[in-house]
Image: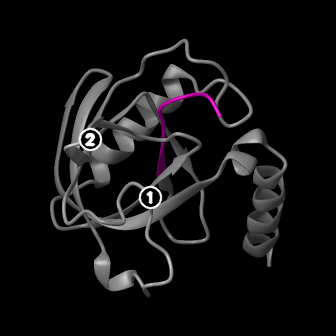
């Protein structure tokens, strides 16, 4: 019961932020590779296409068999998720990925607002991220959420 209450409170809090009005989503992905150098990282994943029911295609990952995120922490770019995402939150997300992004394992990867920016129009499945944050979900594991621009 406490877990359900926490999920409901979190859901209401998220809905009241600017980020919720800006949109967002997440997908189960299978990790292929994760590389980190300080605040910079590259994450290679395969979206879990078996989970899709055909009614929704994620605008970033929905048409990708392989998805590559090249990221860093690069403020200032305004307020994200109703407040500034801190360097320590970004580092915590990277530490989670380092510990749990084992090749072949699933993680929840998501975005808020303009969560990713494609590297180019010819490579829509290779994107940039400017901050990561961990979000608690109703699943056993948190979601790694990406931001690129202010929402």
- Residue located at (82% from left, 51% from top): 13
In terms of secondary structure, where does tag 2 sit? loop
Q: Quadrant of the N terminus?
A: bottom right
Badge 1 local density, few (<14 within 10 Å), some, or many (20+)?
Answer: few
Q: Is residue 70 left or right of residue 26?
A: left
- Residue located at (53% from left, 29% from top): 149
Which label was assigned to residue 114?
none
Q: Decide: marks 1, 2 in contact (CB < 8 A)?
A: no
Q: Nearer the viewer, residue 141 or 18?
A: 18
Rendering colour mode: one colour
**Which of pointers 1 and 2 indicates the residue nearer the eye?**
2
Q: Which residue is mark 1?
A: 59
Which label was assigned to residue 121?
2
Which residue is situated farthest in the top direction here? 76
Q: Position of residue 145 (x, y in %)?
A: 49, 47
Span shown in magenta: 144-151
Q: Quadrant of the C terminus?
A: top right
């Amino acid at each position: 019961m406490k877990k359900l209450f926490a999920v409901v409170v979190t859901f209401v809090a998220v809905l009241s932020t600017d980020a919720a009005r800006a949109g967002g989503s997440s997908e189960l992905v299978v990790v292929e590779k994760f590389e980190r150098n300080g605040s910079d990282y590259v994450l290679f994943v395969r979206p879990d296409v078996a989970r899709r029911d055909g009614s929704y295609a994620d605008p970033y990952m929905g048409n990708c068999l392989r998805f590559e995120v090249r990221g860093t922490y690069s403020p200032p770019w305004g307020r994200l998720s109703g407040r500034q995402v801190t360097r320590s939150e970004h580092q915590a997300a990277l530490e989670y990925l380092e510990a749990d992004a084992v090749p072949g394992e699933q993680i929840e990867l998501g975005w808020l607002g303009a969560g990713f920016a494609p590297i180019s129009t010819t490579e829509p499945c290779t994107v940039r991220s400017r901050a990561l944050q961990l979000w608690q979900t109703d699943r056993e594991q948190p979601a790694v959420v990406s931001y690129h621009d202010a929402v």
